[in-house]
Amino acid sequence: MMETPAAVFCARRPLPCLLLLAVLCLRPGLGLYTVNAVYGDTIVMPCSQEVPNDLMFGKWKYETANASPVFIAFRSSTKKNVQYDEVPEYKDRLSLSENYTLSIKNARISDEKKFVCMLVTEDNVFEEPTLVKVFKQPTHPEIMHPAKFLETEKLKMLGECVARESYPDGNITWYKNGNILQPVEGVVVISLQKTVNRSSGLFTTTSSLQYMPRKEDANAQFTCSVTYYGPSGQETITSQPVVFDVHYPTEKVTIKVLSQRNTIKEGDNITLKCSGNGNPPPREFLFHIPGEPEAIRSSDTYVMTDVRRNATGEYKCSLIDRHMKDSTTITVHYLDLQLTPSGEVTKRIGDALPVSCTISSSRNATVFWMKDNARMQRSPSFLSLQYQDAGNYICETTLQEVEGLKKRKMLTLIVEGKPQIKMTKKTESNKSKTIICHVQGFPKPAVQWTITGSGGIINKTEETKYVNGSFSSKIVISPEENVTLTCIAENELERTVTSMNVSAISIPEYDEPDEENGDNREKINDQAKLIVGIVVGLLLAALVAGIIYWVYMKKSKTASKHVDKDLGNIEENKKLEENNHKSEA
C-alpha cells in the first residue's frame, strides 16, 4: 500500500501529527474567506495566515458535508517540494505556490466548497478556511418555437424563453413593448421549468407564455429576460424582440377609386379597390355597379375600361358573408362640341353665313375661337362675307376642372368672288405715267395688260402680294401719243375687262378710272374698236353740229333784214289809214 506524504511525515514526527489530528477533530468555528470564481477560469485561494518562522509544512484540504476532509496538496518548508494527493477530480488542476496560495484551473461547479489552508509547526497547527463560489453566466435568452400568428379572443402558446447553462439558476421575465407581463387568468399564463445537467451541474431555465392578444397587439414587440447572479452581483440579459402577426376580423369595409387624376372623364379607365380592416384582409368582395342587376364577385379590385357618361353613379362593395358595405359616388365628366357648319365651306362674297358652336358638358365649359392660330375676341358672325373673312376657324372648349378634357372643331371658310377691277393713274414730272390695276377676287385672278393700236400684250408689270383677296398690278409708260390701256382679270368664275385712256400730256395729274359694268364679257379687240368708234362718232357729231350752227347763223342775218322792211311798210299803211279817216270825218 502506497503511503501519502502526510503519513510519511507523521511517522517521523508524531507530535505535530497529533496536534493536526486534534485540530481536525475539534473543528473550531472559524471565519470564512470567500472567493468568487467564474466557471472555466482559475480559482486562486491565498493562504491568508502569516507563515510562521518554525513552519514545518503546509497543507490544503477541502471539506464536504457529512464527509471526512480530503487532503489535496502538501508543501514542505525545508525541502521546498510540493506533493499533490491523488484526488481524481483535481488531477492536473492544482498548483501550490511558495506562499502556500492554492490555484485550481478550469473551475467547475463541483469546486464550490470550503477549502482550508493548514500551516503546521512543531507545537501548533494554524488553519484558514476559504469558501469558493462558482458562477456561470447563462447563454443569451432566446424565444423558441414562436407562434406563426396569434388570434384575438383565443388563448394561444406564444413561445418559450430558454436560458441555458447557468449557475446558479436564473429567473425569466416576459415583456410586451418593454412592460412586464403579469399573469392574468385566461389571458396571460406563464409556466417556469428548470433542469440541471448532472455532469456539469449547469441549469437550463425555460419559461413558456400563453397569450390572448387584442387587435392593438399588432406590431407589438415581445421580449424575455433572464436574471442571474454573477461574481459582481445580480445581472440581466434580454432576448431579441419578436413581433407576432395578430389575426382579427374585419370591422369596416372601404371602397376607393384608384386614379392618377382627381377627376374622371369619358374614355378613362376606372379601378375600384375594396378593402377590409381585418387581418388577414378579405380576399373577395361583392361589387355593386350601377346598371348591373346583380352584384359582381371579384377580388379586391374591379376595373372598368373606356367609361362613358352613363357610368356616373353610386358604387358599393361588401363582404361575401357579412352585410358590411361602403359606397362612393363617381362622376364621369363629358364635353360635347357641335360646330355648324364645319369642315370646308365655300361661299360667295357678300353672302351671309350663320355660324354656331354648341357646347354640352358636365360642368361649365370655357369656349374660345381662333382664326389662323390667332385668338379671336368674339365669336365670328358673317352678314356679308368679305375676302378677309376667309381662313381656318377653330372653336375650342375645355373643362378647366377636368385635366385633359378638351374638344375642338374646325371650319375652313373659302370666300369666292368674280374679279373686280379699279384702275388709277399718276403722271410724274418726267412724262412717265404709272397705271395701277387694283384687282379683287378669289381664286386669285390672272392679270393681263394690253395697249390699243398694236393690241400687244404688256409683260413688264409689277404685282403686289395677294392678301385677303386683293392685289394690284402696275405698269409704267411714257406715251408719245394718246393710248388706251386695258386691264384684264380672269379667274375660274369670270373674266373682267376695264380700260383707261392715257394722254400724252406731261402735266402732272391724277385721274380716276372710267369704270365699266362688271358684266362686260366682250373680247378685248371688240372693246377697243367700240371705244375708237365712239370717239370718231363724237368727232363727227361735233363737226356736223358746227356746220349746222354756221348755216343757222347765216340764215338768221337774212331774215333780220326782211323783218325790218316789213315793219316799215306796216307803219306806212297805218299812217295812210289815219289820213283817210280824217278826210271822211
Image: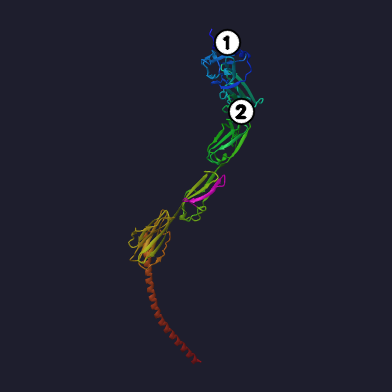
What residue is shown with label 1?
A: 14
Residue 174, quarter of the rendered image = top right
Q: Quadrant of the N terminus?
A: top right
Q: Position of residue 582 (x, y in %)?
A: 49, 91
Task: Determine crowd level at label 2: few under 14, some 14-19, many 20+ residues with C-alpha closer than 10 A.
Answer: some
Residue range corresponding to the magenta coloring: 358-375
- CB under 8 Å between discs 1 and 2: no
Q: Earlier in the sequence, mark 1 or mark 2?
A: 1
Query: Callout 1: helix, strand or loop?
Result: helix
The residue that disc 2 covers is 175
**Splitting the image into 4 quarters, where does residue 186 fall?**
top right
**At x 58% / y 10%, what residue is drawn?**
14
Q: Secondary structure at mark 2?
A: strand
Residue at position x 47%, y 88% in the image: 577
Label 1 neighbourhood size at 10 Å, few (<14), some (14-19), many (20+)? few
Question: Observer-nearest residue: 378 or 21?
Answer: 21
Decide if residue 295 is in sight here: no
Near-viewer residue (142 or 216): 142
At label 1, the amino acid type is Pro
